[in-house]
Image (tube, grey):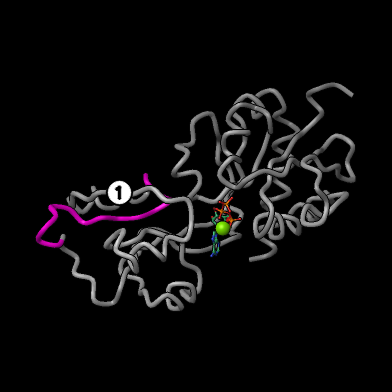
């Protein structure tokens, strides 16, 4: 099999895998194994030319940028943080939908406490948060976290958080409220720029099938 016939698609476990699978199936691709039960990081598909690699959500753009995967599926949040170098983003898959939001305690004043010049914002989404507050002309101090952002305002680590919100139940369970909407988030198909050129016919056919599948699901 010549190299330009092979395709590697990078996916993360959990909601992205679960919600991408039906789209891939509509495009004629089925995973040979379930990544939730298999420990394998490289999965075969029913098409011997196509493999899936299963990686952390935030690593997907990096694998695709360097051509270790030809294609991938990544949340817009992850793409904003990565920056998108070396990638095309040809298709909104309209899956894993949520919102990037500013949230905090219901009594939060949106001005810094007198002892500090700036509001403190805890987040995993540093670039998204910086961009949002810069656009409002507000100088803030960003504290980078890797998870459980909801805790930060409760223990005085930060005044506010920037986090993904779907139903709002996690915020609510921790006594927090949504304060500002930053952007709507969904997952995108991303393509390595060199693969887009070198494997054009193959990649394009897959993008088109996925596009039809997305439209059929809408
Ligand atoms: P990791 O768990 O590896 O740190 P992650 O939490 O971003 O990364 P997932 O929870 O699998 O990984 O989320 C993958 C993508 O799904 C996110 O990048 C985002 O676009 C979207 N997402 C995250 N949280 C939600 C949510 N609560 N509702 C809907 N979509 C979400
Ligand atoms: Mg998560």
Total marks in image: 1
> Which SS class for mark 1?
strand
Disc 1 under 8 Å from ligand 1? The reply is no
x 43%, y 72%: residue: 171
Residue 130 locus on image (x, y percent): 30, 47
* Residue at image point 49% right, 31% down: 85
Where is residue 207, by image quadrant? top right
Against 158, is 71 above or below? above
Pick out the residue farthest to the front: 155
x and y, in percent, of residue 76 in the image: 50, 50
Label 1 crowd (10 A; few <14 / some 14-19 / many >=20): many
Q: Is residue 127 left or right of residue 204?
A: left
Residue 199: say if magenta. no
Residue ID for mark 1: 142
Q: Residue at x 68, y 65 (%)?
A: 217
> Can residue 120 be found in the magenta stretch?
yes
Q: Quadrant of the N terminus?
A: top right
Which region is colored magenta? 113-127
Q: Where's residue 9, x and y in %?
A: 72, 40
């Amino acid at each position: 099999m010549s190299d330009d016939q092979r395709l590697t698609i990078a996916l993360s476990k959990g909601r992205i895998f679960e919600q991408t699978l039906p789209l891939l199936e509509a495009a004629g691709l089925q995973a040979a194994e379930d990544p939730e039960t298999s420990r394998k990081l490289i999965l075969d598909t029913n098409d011997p030319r196509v493999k899936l690699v299963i990686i952390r959500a935030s690593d997907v753009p990096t694998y695709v940028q360097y051509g270790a995967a030809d294609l991938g599926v990544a949340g817009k949040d992850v793409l904003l943080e990565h920056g998108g170098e070396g990638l095309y983003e040809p298709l909104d898959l309209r899956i894993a939908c949520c919102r990037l939001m500013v949230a905090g305690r219901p009594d939060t004043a949106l001005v810094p406490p007198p002892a500090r010049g700036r509001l403190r914002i805890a987040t995993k989404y540093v670039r998204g948060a910086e961009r949002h507050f810069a656009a409002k002309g507000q100088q803030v101090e960003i504290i980078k976290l890797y998870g459980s952002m909801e805790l930060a305002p409760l223990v005085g680590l930060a005044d506010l958080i920037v986090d993904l919100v779907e139903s709002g139940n996690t915020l609510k369970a921790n006594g927090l409220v949504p304060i500002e909407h930053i952007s709507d988030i969904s997952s995108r198909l991303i393509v390595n720029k060199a693969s887009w050129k070198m494997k054009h016919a193959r990649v394009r056919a897959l993008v088109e099938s996925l596009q039809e599948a997305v439209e059929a699901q809408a």
